[in-house]
Image (cartoon, helix red, strand yellow):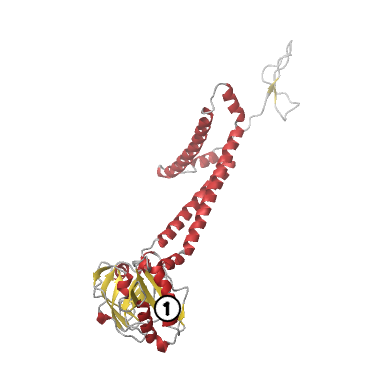
Amino acid sequence: MATVLIALEIALACAVLCNACFLIAGRIDAIQVDSGVDEASLATVQLAGYENAHAVDLNARVLTGLGSIAGVQSVSLLNSIPFGARRGTAGITTDMAGKHFGGVVEFYVGGPGSLSALGTRLVAGRNPQPDDFRPFTALMPDDASVQVTRALAEHLWPGVDPLGKEFWLDKSHFRVVGVIDHLVRPDPGGWPGDSRDWSVFVPAQSSVYLSGSYLLRAAPTDLPRVLRDARAAIAKIAPDAVLDQDGTQTLGDLRTRSFQKDRAMIGMLVGVIVALLLVTALGIVGLASFWVAQRRRQIGIRRAIGATRRELPDRQLRHRAGHGAGLCTQSVADDALRTAAPAAGLPADRRRRTVAARPARRARPRVARRGRAAGGGDEGIAVPGMEGRQWETGKTRA
């Protein structure tokens, strides 16, 4: 019984261990996702609480003021930031009628210089040109020349050159003019596989729908100081707006915060694995001690006739290993015979039917022979249940 219990414990531990390792591998894969941007050189400034009527003027003041800070390489408008707030998630179709759904993608709407500031790598086509940045009065431009990620292009048009292809978002029409290697969604942890990289960059000019979100680029060594100076300068540059302290961060800090729960989950699963291994090890040690205690007398006899301390554990291990191998072999052979019996024309229940059809034997009566008495007498058979009757088996002497 103890052997069965420890075997069940080991099986349960192995099952939990495999599932925990699978979950840990998935979390690590999410944490190590390639954003496709130069994270070490980027930061974002987020504003809120301003009037929509003053949005264009606010953008002009902030772009000019932040651009004058020492160490700033570029300042640009960008509606969403990788690992930051999500503002452009929408479903697209590959036909104007909207019958062929293409999936849910992330639209990065950015002003002049924003795509180059991100540091994405172009693999086909071209980057946005000055004429591509057009004004718009709705959530998206009505018609735009866009760049898509390689993963999205392979999803929408597998095995086909995506340059020149078209897709739609309601009435907005987009034409692909460039393919970039990677541009991760703002929330990559919530999307499986390559879908976390389904992004579209839409060039546009400053408007009510593209305001209050700014991308800063600086040298990695200067970035912390530049962000501190930007926080302090916003109070003077835009007194009519409120600085979002949680959203105004470097991309490295945003990435760390985005995967904080995943790291906590990894730590918890590692703790579960260590606890299971410890409990299983203690169970195996206890079972081994129980086996040794059961065979203490045999061990003493072997020690008395000259067995060494090293030979005793080896013999115990060989004995248990042989016992386990024998049980496994017996189980496998039994299953093989049950499988092969129908193929050979021998029904598995032949023995049972043969035994059932065999007639039962009559029980023989127990007999007792009476020996001859000295000087003669009768020789007969005593049958149980026939007491008092004499059955002759030979001549009766007078």
Q: In this view, does 238 lie to the left or right of 37?
A: right
Give whichever of 3, 89 is nearer the camera: 89
For the residue labelled by badge 1, is the local secondary structure a helix, a strand or a loop? helix
> From this viewpoint, is residue 77 visible?
no
Residue closest to the far bottom = 53
Give the quadrant of residue 86: bottom left
Q: In this view, does 129 lie above or below 26?
A: below
Give the quadrant of residue 103: bottom left
Residue closest to the far front = 70
Rendered-image quadrant of the N terminus = top right
* Residue at the spot 51% in from the left edge and 30% down from the top edge: 315
Question: For mark 1, what is the residue?
Answer: 233
Can you give x and y, in whole percent of width and height, for residue 274 in the image?
52, 50
Rendered-image quadrant of the C terminus = top right
Residue count near mark 1 (Cα–Cα under 10 Å), binned few <14, some 14–19, many ≥20: some
Q: How many labels does the image show?
A: 1
**Amino acid at pointer 1:** Ala
* Residue at the spot 25% in from the left edge and 82% down from the top edge: 131
Residue closest to the far right = 388
